[in-house]
Image (spheres, rainbow, N blue to C red):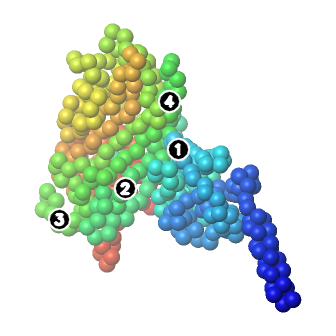
């Protein structure tokens, strides 16, 4: 009798276990509904890698709802693909669920920038801490007032002062740390006006583009050194032949243009915004070589760039003129190809290189240092960006550089 009772109890336990397992089965529809009901912030916490979690970087813990969904999908194999353009990141699951996220996102008082790393969702940590709070995907304190026509007030070709609007970020360098060491890449997330994503329109369609300044090759730190006037002090020093920055103009999809009589017909007379200023491409022509191109941008200044071989990614054959003056130090790389008889423009890169030693002291700007050497501030391409050495803390060895359309120090 006892043996029989034990068998019955055992069967009951097995039955309860099976019922429990069955109740834990999760349908695809249920999981997709859970995803749909998550806020953007909670959704990111669920799908991101553990080493990229916002909760560990923000001033909050992961929500109970995000934790619940995360535990649920651990029982189901869900994989993701990640795609992005200048404004959106799109995550698509193997269960057919799709979620669009803005590339910029507020978490508390911090502003983050999302991007795809293969099929993983990643972000910079954080790109800004907003003093007056973060709302609507930007810092409240960082919302500048744009002048009329974007360019009515500017710094001027050698100015070290500021204008009635600003759009800049501060970068801290500790000790001998360089801009390259700090992985400084400035795009629309940091400079919301100067590098706002744009649309290039012609008869072939509408093409989204992005701009940025990359300092990967800037290997200079703040150094205690004598300037050319034999004055020893802490300077942000860029020596002759060193990279200042690399400017990139990148199209999400190649801009297409027919070629007629050595003219890139669908590029000419089209409007594009560079560094927050409006330009018209007044000339787009072949030079001598078949794979050559010369583009003339007419706006607040005239910028002429050329590349004798747009099929390579080296700058040996590129050149730049600004307002009729050749900028010998800068390197231009225009990348494109011929596809189906039409020209496809992919990107434009300008490597900005120092023409002399530039000694930028505390409170001074890069354009002032360039002027002090009698060199061309036009090499920076636009008056709408500059670098200022804002401060130096001798106790910690911390230097603060401001980059962009400079704000008042007052």
Q: Nearer the viewer, residue 391 or 274?
A: 274
Note whether 105 is above or below 253 in the view shown.
below
Q: Which residue is identified by label 2?
A: 184
Mark sitting on residue 83: 1
Query: Of circles 3 and 1, which is in front?
Result: 1
Which of the marked residues, 2 or 3, is nearer the chain's N terminus?
Answer: 2
In the displayed image of the protein, which residue is found farthest to the top?
A: 261
Mark 4 in CB contact with mark 2 (< 8 angstroms) = no
Q: Which residue is identified by label 3?
A: 225
Q: Secondary structure at mark 2?
A: loop
Please provide percent x and percent y for residue 171.
39, 61
Q: Secondary structure at mark 3?
A: strand
Q: Residues within 10 Å of mark 3 (few under 14, many from 20)?
A: some
Q: Secondary structure at mark 4?
A: strand
Q: Residues within 10 Å of mark 2 (few under 14, many from 20)?
A: some
Which of the marked residues, 3 or 4, is nearer the chain's N terminus?
Answer: 4
Q: To which quarter of the image does residue 410 belong?
A: bottom left
Note whether 213 is above or below 398 in the view shown.
above
Residue at image point 60% right, 62% down: 45
Q: Which residue is identified by label 4?
A: 207
Note whether 118 is above or below 14 in the view shown.
above
Label tally: 4
Which of the marked residues, 1 or 4, is nearer the chain's N terminus?
Answer: 1
Q: With 123 as the anchor, is 308 left or right in this view?
A: left
Tell me if residue 132 can be seen: no
């Amino acid at each position: 009798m006892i043996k029989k009772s034990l068998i019955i109890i055992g069967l009951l336990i097995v039955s309860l276990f099976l019922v429990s397992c069955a109740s834990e089965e999760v349908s695809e529809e249920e999981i997709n509904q859970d995803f749909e009901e998550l806020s953007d912030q909670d959704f990111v916490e669920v799908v991101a890698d553990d080493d990229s979690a916002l909760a560990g970087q923000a001033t909050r813990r992961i929500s109970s709802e995000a934790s619940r969904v995360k535990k649920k999908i651990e029982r189901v194999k869900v994989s993701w693909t990640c795609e992005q353009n200048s404004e959106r990141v799109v995550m698509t699951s193997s269960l057919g669920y799709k979620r669009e996220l803005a590339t910029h996102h507020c978490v508390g008082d911090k502003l983050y920038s999302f991007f795809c790393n293969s099929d993983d969702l990643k972000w910079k940590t954080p790109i800004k801490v907003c003093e007056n709070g973060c709302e609507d995907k930007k810092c409240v304190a960082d919302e500048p007032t744009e002048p009329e026509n974007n360019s009515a007030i500017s710094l001027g070709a050698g100015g070290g002062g500021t204008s009635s609007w600003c759009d800049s970020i501060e970068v801290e360098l500790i000790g001998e740390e360089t801009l390259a060491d700090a992985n400084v890449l400035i795009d629309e997330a940091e400079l919301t006006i100067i590098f706002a994503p744009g649309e290039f329109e012609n008869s072939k369609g509408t093409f989204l583009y992005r701009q940025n300044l990359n300092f990967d090759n800037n290997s200079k730190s703040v150094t205690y050194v004598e300037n050319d006037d034999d004055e020893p002090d802490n300077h942000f020093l860029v020596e002759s032949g060193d990279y200042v920055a690399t400017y990139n103009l990148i199209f999400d999809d190649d801009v297409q243009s027919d070629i007629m009589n050595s003219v890139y017909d669908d590029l000419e007379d089209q409007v594009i915004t560079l560094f927050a200023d409006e330009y018209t491409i007044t000339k787009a022509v072949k030079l001598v070589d078949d794979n050559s191109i010369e583009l003339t941008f007419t706006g607040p200044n005239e910028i002429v760039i050329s590349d004798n071989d747009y099929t390579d990614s080296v700058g040996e054959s590129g050149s730049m003129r600004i307002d009729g003056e050749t900028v010998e130090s800068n390197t231009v790389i225009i990348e494109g190809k011929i596809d189906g008889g039409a020209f496809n423009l992919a990107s434009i890169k300008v490597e900005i290189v120092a023409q002399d030693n530039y000694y930028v002291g505390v409170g001074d700007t890069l354009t002032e240092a360039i002027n002090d050497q009698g060199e061309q501030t036009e090499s920076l391409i636009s008056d709408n960006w500059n670098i200022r050495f804002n401060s130096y803390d001798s106790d910690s060895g911390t230097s603060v550089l401001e980059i962009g359309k400079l704000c008042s120090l007052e």
